[in-house]
Image (cartoon, grey):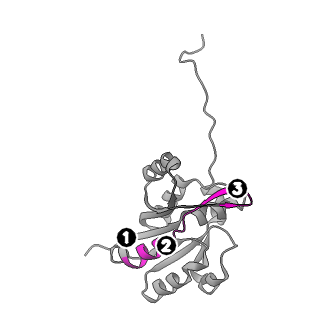
Amino acid sequence: MKNKPNYAFIDSNNLYLGIKSEGWTIDYAKFRLYLKNKYNVDKAFLFIGMIDKNKKLYDTFEKQGYTLIFKPTVRYFENGEETRKGNVDAELVLHSAAIQYKKYNKAVIVSGDGDFACLVKYLIEKNKLLLILTPNKHYSGLLRRYDLYIKRIDNSRSSLEYKATKKTRTSGRSKP
């Protein structure tokens, strides 16, 4: 019987905000390859709030090899500014502990959110957790008891940081 692959379950907002708080931007294409090459992740589920104007971004994520799981967002105002929140925690737990559970060998949980402590405990008990990738050192105290499973993404900044490339314009003809 063929070995089952590993799957990653990514809390997109926690990853994005955690890396941003460290002053850099993650390159999602590099991160997808990192998951595949370093942890043998066959499928990477990106749990994300659905906002219609972000369709181009979602298409890019899918082209980079992510499987998107959408959550409707709730609009609210904070300090006079419009904010949207798509709480993906329940979907991430449901997919990793039930929907996808029998299809993968080990799970990689990408989040520093303590709401996933019960999931982590469950996956460890079932010998299904490979590791927890936290964006930085500021992860929940509820995950501290699982430090043996934690690897920080910010420690791989040099290989995962997004670096914008300058596009040069040419007229289409060579210089004489």
First along the sequence among labels 3 and 2: 3
Question: Residue at 63% across / 35% down in the picture?
Answer: 166
| Picture quarter with the N terminus | bottom left
Q: Which residues are magenta?
A: 77-98
Q: Nearer the viewer, residue 123 or 172?
A: 123
Asked whether the beta carbons under mark 1 and mark 2 sit within 8 Å of each other, the answer is no
Q: Determine whether label 3 and label 2 are within 8 Å by CB.
A: no
Q: What is the count of numbered marks?
A: 3
- Residue under label 3: 81
Q: Mark 1 to mark 2: distance in Å?
A: 11 Å
**Could you tell me which secondary element the residue under label 3 belongs to?**
strand
Would you identify the image quadrant in which residue 126 lies?
bottom left
Point out which mark residue 108 bears.
2
Residue type at tag 3: Glu
Mark 1 falls on what kind of element?
Answer: loop
**Viewer-side residue, 108 vs 56:** 56
Q: Looking at the image, which residue is at 52% across and 73% down?
A: 89
- The percent position of residue 46, horizontal first and vertical second, equals 48, 62
- The Cα atoms of the two marked residues, 1 and 3, are separated by 43 Å
